[in-house]
């Protein structure tokens, strides 16, 4: 969602380079907030995704001050010694968030274009503030020197898994599909993708999409055999 | 500029020579570079200036050749020749002119006419406002350094000779990663 921390692992400074590309070098910290504790500022939680190590290009060169022999040695000594992670939080369902068809703007084929009405709410903002605090605390506790924090939230829709808009629910008045992703209005229409998700959870959604699609297809096959569809 | 193995060996030898005789060797290397490259975007004096500035930013040392052997000026020249960004192109001309103006102010002579100490003084002045650039020369330093970094560390010299990049090879035996214990 934007906020994250960058740290320097002092123990790695000046160490000979190792092959860190092309191996599983990233790390994932699953959600830890509002499981046993209760946060005053927000509900639900977020995970951290991060990585470190040597790569083909020493990105630290851009942030290293000065020039000349010292600069060059500094870049070399610190390459691979940095670690970074960013927060991935749940975006709650907000009534005000929706999409519709533009009444005027049409694409090259004369089809109305989509309009997105989407904003983060107060819960997301509070959660993002906590990402910076918690991320910094984790690095400091691990003995990693925090060299940068980013507390800006990304623009809505920047970091995205396409979820929502055809939400799942029991009430046809407030939802588009039922628990089997079957349209309330059109019984032989099933929407088996992420658009039925009610909120964008803090995890990547693909496995949930697959699991729901599996369940919906099983239901669809059963109903079809019974002659209900 | 593609660096052949032969050129790499020659460059390494030149680096060793440069360390032994710091005054003579860089000038020889510079003369060799200037003689072989016909710039596509810069004028010949501009190209020589970029070549020298880049080498001052990332010089040769005991580990690896510097920006000159890595072909940094040639890379920047090629990028700008191919660029459709006329603002960017204009910034390079005006930035290099700002370096000359600063050199005239400080020492009353063109940058490349200055002694190594005088050249260093000009670049040091340009780099003084790195975090918060104000003068044209300070703004140009950011631009020059950013492009030099990008060019050098994506070159064969930067990737292999300087950074000892281990990628694009088969990893045999035990994983050779660093053990934090």
Image (cartoon, rainbow, N blue to C red):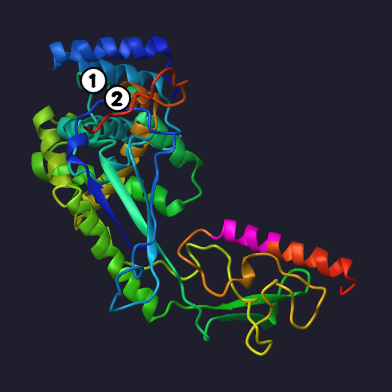
Instruction: Please state which of residues B157 and A83 is positioned toward the viewer in this rendering.
Output: A83
Residue identifier under label 2: B162
When asked about the image quadrant of residue B127, the answer is top left
Query: Where are the magenta residues, as a range?
Result: A205-214
Whether residue B96 is visible: no
Q: Earlier in the sequence, mark 1 or mark 2?
A: 1
Give the distance between the C-alpha atoms of the residues marked 1 and 2, in whole angstroms: 6 Å
Mark 2 belongs to chain:
B
Q: Are marks 1 and 2 on the same chain?
A: yes
Secondary structure that dominates the magenta span: helix
When asked about the image quadrant of residue B179, the answer is top left
Q: Most extreme residue toward the right, as rendered?
A: A227
Residue A211 lies within the magenta run: yes
Which quarter of the image is occupied by the N terminus of chain A? Answer: bottom left
Tell me, yes or no, whether the two marked residues, 1 and 2, touch with CB atoms within 8 Å: yes
The percent position of residue A44, horizontal first and vertical second, equals: 40, 72
The percent position of residue A195, horizontal first and vertical second, equals: 63, 70
């Amino acid at each position: 969602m934007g906020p994250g921390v960058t740290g320097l692992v002092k123990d790695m400074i000046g160490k000979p380079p190792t092959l860190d590309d092309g191996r599983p070098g990233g790390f994932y910290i699953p959600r830890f907030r509002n499981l046993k504790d209760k946060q005053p500022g927000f509900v639900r939680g977020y995970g951290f995704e991060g990585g470190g190590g040597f790569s083909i290009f020493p990105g630290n060169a851009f942030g290293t001050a000065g020039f000349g022999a010292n600069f060059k040695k500094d870049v070399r000594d610190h390459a691979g010694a940095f670690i970074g992670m960013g927060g991935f939080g749940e975006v709650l369902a907000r009534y005000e968030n929706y999409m519709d068809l533009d009444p005027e703007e049409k694409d090259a084929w004369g089809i109305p274009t989509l309009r997105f009405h989407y904003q983060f709410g107060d819960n997301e903002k509070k959660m993002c503030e906590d990402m910076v605090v918690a991320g910094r605390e984790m690095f400091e506790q691990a003995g990693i020197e925090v060299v940068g924090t980013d507390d800006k939230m990304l623009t809505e829709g920047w970091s995205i898994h396409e979820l929502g808009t055809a939400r799942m629910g029991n009430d046809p008045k407030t939802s588009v599909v039922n628990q089997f992703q079957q349209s309330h209005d059109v019984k032989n229409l099933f929407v088996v993708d992420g658009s039925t998700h009610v909120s964008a959870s803090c995890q990547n959604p693909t496995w949930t999409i697959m699991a729901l699609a599996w369940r919906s297809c099983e239901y669809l096959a059963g109903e079809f055999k019974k002659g209900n569809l | 500029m593609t660096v052949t193995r032969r050129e790499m060996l020659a460059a390494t030898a030149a680096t060793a020579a440069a360390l032994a005789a710091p005054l003579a060797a860089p000038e020889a290397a510079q003369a060799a570079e200037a003689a072989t490259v016909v710039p596509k975007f810069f004028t010949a004096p501009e190209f020589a200036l970029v070549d020298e500035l880049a080498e001052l930013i990332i010089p040769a040392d005991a580990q690896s050749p510097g920006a000159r052997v890595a072909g940094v000026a040639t890379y920047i020249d090629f990028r700008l020749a191919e660029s459709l960004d006329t603002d960017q192109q204009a910034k390079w001309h005006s930035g290099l002119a700002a370096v000359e103006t600063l050199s005239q102010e400080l020492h009353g002579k063109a940058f490349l006419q200055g002694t190594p100490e005088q050249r260093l003084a000009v670049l040091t002045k340009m780099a003084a406002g790195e975090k918060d650039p104000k003068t044209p020369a300070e703004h140009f330093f950011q631009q020059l350094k950013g492009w030099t970094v990008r060019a050098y560390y994506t070159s064969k010299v930067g990737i292999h000779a300087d950074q000892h990049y281990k990628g694009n090879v088969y990893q045999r035996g035990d994983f050779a990663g660093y053990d934090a214990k």
